[in-house]
Amino acid sequence: MRPLCLVVGLLLAGCAMPTTVQPRDAEGYRALRFIETVRLAGPAGQTWEFAAGTILAGDRRRDRDGALLYCGQMTERQGAATVRPVCAMKRGDILLVHADLFAEGFARPVPAGAIEPFRLR
């Protein structure tokens, strides 16, 4: 029942900020690669997991402020494991998960060196 409550709460909060898909430039998309598996605490007792090797592509911008979003997939665990789409922003060692749904997203610290930036061609 908790996931249903979370979804209803998100809908009532006015989630899903409009985004625009960005064209890939000659150097490729900015991207983030998880060097090691990272587990983050989500709301309502969930755990968000980004397995080592997971790539988030910087292929969208929020219409509201032009912020670059890195999008891909993560595994959400609350009892069973479910693969879900996710968009995030990165500021230093902080990952802002679901930054496409909220003004900032859920700020979660990430171990230093767990994520590397690169260009996805």
Image (spheres, rainbow, N blue to C red):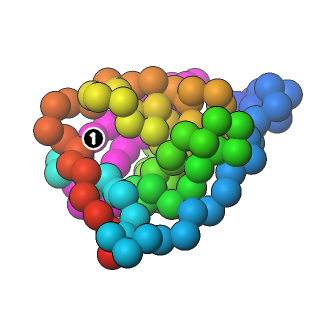
Residue under the image location 51 percent in, 47 percent down: 69
Q: Is residue 4 left or right of residue 45?
A: right
- Residue beneath the point at 23% across and 45% down: 115
Residue visible at 64% across and 27% down?
103
| Disc 1 crowd, CA 10 A, few/some/many (<14, 14-19, 20+) | some
Locate residue 77 relative to residue 53 in the image: left or right.
right
Callout 1: helix, strand or loop?
Answer: strand
Q: How many marks?
A: 1
**In this orientation, does residue 55 appear?**
yes
**Residue 90 belongs to the span the image colors magenta:** no
Drawn side of residue 58 relative to residue 37, left or right: right
Q: Which residues lie in the magenta part?
A: 38-55
Residue 92: quadrant of the picture: top left
Q: Position of residue 66 (x, y in %)?
A: 60, 42
Above or below — where is 121 with respect to 36? below
User: Along the line of sight, which residue is nearer the eye, 72 or 117?
Assistant: 117
Q: Is residue 54 above or below residue 102?
A: below
Quarter placement of the C terminus: bottom left
Which amino acid is tagged 1? Val
Give the residue pinned by disc 1. Answer: 38
Is residue 53 covered in magenta?
A: yes
In the figure, residue 98 lies in which quadrant?
Answer: top right
Residue occupying the far left of the picture: 113
Q: Using the rendered view, name the quadrant where residue 7 is placed.
A: top right
Residue 82, image x, y percentages: 51, 54
| Residue 84 seen in the current view | no
Q: Which is more toward the observer, 76 or 116?
A: 116
The residue positioned 74% from the left and 47% from the top of the image is 18
Question: Which quadrant of the figure contains the N terminus?
Answer: top right
Q: Position of residue 63 (x, y in %)?
A: 70, 45
Q: Is residue 102 left or right of residue 98?
A: right
